[in-house]
Amino acid sequence: MNELKTKILKQLLALQADRIEELLRYQSDLSDALHSESKSTAGDKHDTSRAMIHLEQEKLQHQFQELQLQLQRLREINELNPLTQANFGALVETTSDLFLLGASLGKQVVDGRAIYCIGMEAPIAQAMLNKAIADQLLFNGKLTEILAIS
C-alpha cells in the first residue's frame, strides 16, 4: 500500500504543478489584456474592461493561493512515514473506498482505482480520526471497516 500512496502523491503533485502552470499562463494573458486596455481611451467601456480584468486577477490570485496551500499539504504528506492510525497524511483503505486524509482534492483515479482526497475537516475524515486497522466506523448510516493504513 506504501507503493500506491507514493504513486498517488506523485500524481497529485504533478496535477497541482500543471494547475499552477495553467494559472500562470492565464495570469500572463490577463496582464497582456490589461496592458492593451491601458492603451485604449474609450471612456466608460475602457474603465469597465479594466475593472473586469482586475476582478479576474483577484480571483486568479485567490486560486493561486489555494493551489499553493494544497501543494504544501501534499508535500507534508509526502514527507510522513507510514502511519498506523487514520491521521493527517494517512492513506486509508476501507471496505468501501480508499481515502487520502489531509488534502481536499476530491476524487482522483490512480492505476484504475478511485481515491478520495479529503481534508481533515471533512465529516468522513473526522469519523476516521485515530482509528486503526480492523476498527469500524459508522458514517451516513453505513458501517465500514478499516482494512489498511499507510
Image (tube, helix red, strand yellow):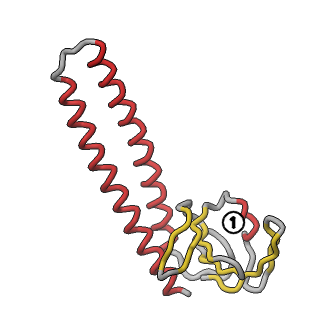
Three-letter amino acid code of the residue under disc 1 = Ala
Which of 118/96 is in front? 96
Secondary structure state at the residue bearing disc 1: helix
Tell me the residue at 76%/81% (across/down).
145
Label 1 crowd (10 A; few <14 / some 14-19 / many >=20):
many
> On the image, numbered disc 1 is attached to which residue?
125
User: Measured from the top left, where is residue 7 in percent x and y?
Assistant: 45, 80
User: Measured from the top left, where is residue 25 in percent x and y?
Assistant: 27, 49
User: Measured from the top left, where is residue 103 in percent x and y?
Assistant: 55, 63
* Quarter of the C terminus within the rendering: bottom right
Q: Quadrant of residue 17?
A: bottom left
Q: Quadrant of residue 138?
A: bottom right
Tell me the residue at 72%/60% (across/down).
123
Relative placement, left or right, of 140 versus 104 is right
Relative placement, left or right, of 69 versus 44 is right
Relative placement, left or right, of 138 versus 7 is right
State the residue lying farthest toward the top: 43
Is 86 rendered above or below residue 102?
A: below
Tell me the residue at 80%/64% (across/down).
140
* Quarter of the N terminus within the rendering: bottom right
Relative placement, left or right, of 22 versus 38 is right
Is 135 rendered above or below residue 16?
A: below
Is 135 rendered above or below residue 102?
A: below
